[in-house]
Amino acid sequence: MTLTPSQSTQPTGVRWRILFLLLLISIVTYIDRVNISVTARHMMPSLGLTDVQMGWIFSAFVFGYALFQVPGGWMGDRWGPRRVLTFAVIWWSIFTALTAIAPTLPLVHFIGIMGSLMFVRFLIGIGEAASLPNFNRSVANWHPPHERGLSIGITIGGIGIGSALTPPITAWIMVNYGWQTAFYAAGLLGLAIALLWYWYARDFPRQHPHVNNAEAAIIEGKSLETQIPPLPSKGEGRGEGGKHQPTTVPWKTILTTPTVWWLVLSYTCLGYVAYIYMSWFYLYLVNVRGFAILQGAFFASAPFVAMTIFCPLGGWVTDRLAEKYGINWGRASVGGTGMILAALCIIIGANVEAPYVAIGFLSLGAGWLYFTVGPFWSSTTDLSKPYAGTLSGLMNTGANLGGTLSPTLTPWIADSYGWPLALGLAAVMAFIGSLCWLFIKPGLGLKHE
């Protein structure tokens, strides 16, 4: 007799397929975010846009992205990541494609070409805001405590893959088929992956037809969660196996829990540093370190390769340490150590004279920075699994506030005082972020009244 998946004693591996789909969405997220920085080279002369105007268009995305982090996470907690992510990816994919025709939309008659592009990019930011909090929501639902750091690390590692792949692919499409085609292609890719996600994914393991009892039992393991006090709550929503979970967010409890604010502050510091790599690293290599344009494009991918490697590695390490020494030590040791090492590497890279050595240390700085991603995002689930989406959205709002500041402040400091000081401030921010981990104790859960 042939055993069905639900009868087999060998655990199925559906959670890892769900994780792979999340990784694909993560890659698409950063393709749709970064492609405009490449197409800007052709867009600006063809549309008559200045550097300052293009900067405002870039900022419109970040504003929408930061503004809707918490609502996006709350929707995942309330309605489940399957529907929310599907809608979000379709939403931002449509507006990614519309970027190509934004200069000809009727809006141009009222707010001009720059205003039309800002509006479209703002709407893309709103859609993408739901992505990372719902990645965390999915990982919380689909992975046991001892796998969550690794799992969110793999998922967010898509940032490095997407950011490294986008420049050469987008540039090739732009040169051969025009800058508009790059946006059409990215939009179609997003729509395809959204449909694939909706077809295969489920909100909870026991809702999936291919998950057997053995895998469900692994996912529902309580070895670490038993350390976390249960949170009293009001209202009901969806929980394990389709049961109901709290949906009335206990904002008073969340906002009076010190660990939440230390997490937000530390992640704000991380965001400040990360956005320097995403916005200025290429120009730093070309204008300051003297690399040719093509050389600079090649070496500018080095920090993102480091992120791709270090992000899941840090997640794996924090899981192992949390399992052996407890959640508080397991998260804080990796989070604090990673940010200290990031600060040291950035300081060395900013001040060393040899350009290739500088690239090596600055890339390691990015890697160690993202080594801490697993502890950050796992901590929001450790604090309260039912509100993992909302809490991670709140934390990621901090990162984008820091990310809004650094792209503008960094070139001003560099022009006024030099790049070593501009990058030195980034190192200071990473160091401050490391100190915050002395006060982050996710194993205690949310504060109880």
Image (cartoon, rainbow, N blue to C red):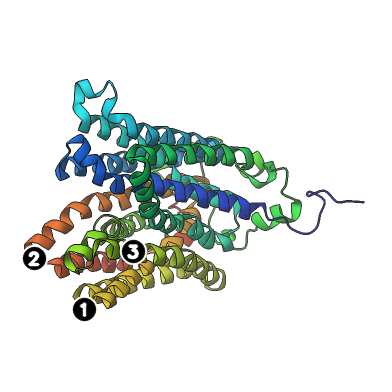
**How dense is the environment of label 3, judged by Cα within 10 Å: few (below 14), some, or many (20 and up)?**
some
Distance from Cα at disc 1 to Cα at disc 3? 20 Å
Q: Nearer the viewer, mark 1 or mark 2?
A: 1
Look at label 3 and name its amino acid: Phe
**How dense is the environment of label 2, judged by Cα within 10 Å: few (below 14), some, or many (20 and up)?**
few
Look at label 2 and name its amino acid: Tyr
Q: Secondary structure at mark 3?
A: helix
- Indicate the position of residue 425 as horizontal and vertical percent values: 19, 65
Circles 1 and 2, Cβ within 8 Å, touching? The answer is no
Give the camera-side residue of 414 and 334.
414
Look at label 1 and name its amino acid: Val
Q: Which mark is residue 298?
A: 3
- Residue at image mark 2: 417
- Look at 49% across and 64% down and name the residue there: 312
Circles 3 and 2, Cβ within 8 Å, touching? The answer is no
In this picture, residue 80 sits left or right of residue 102:
right
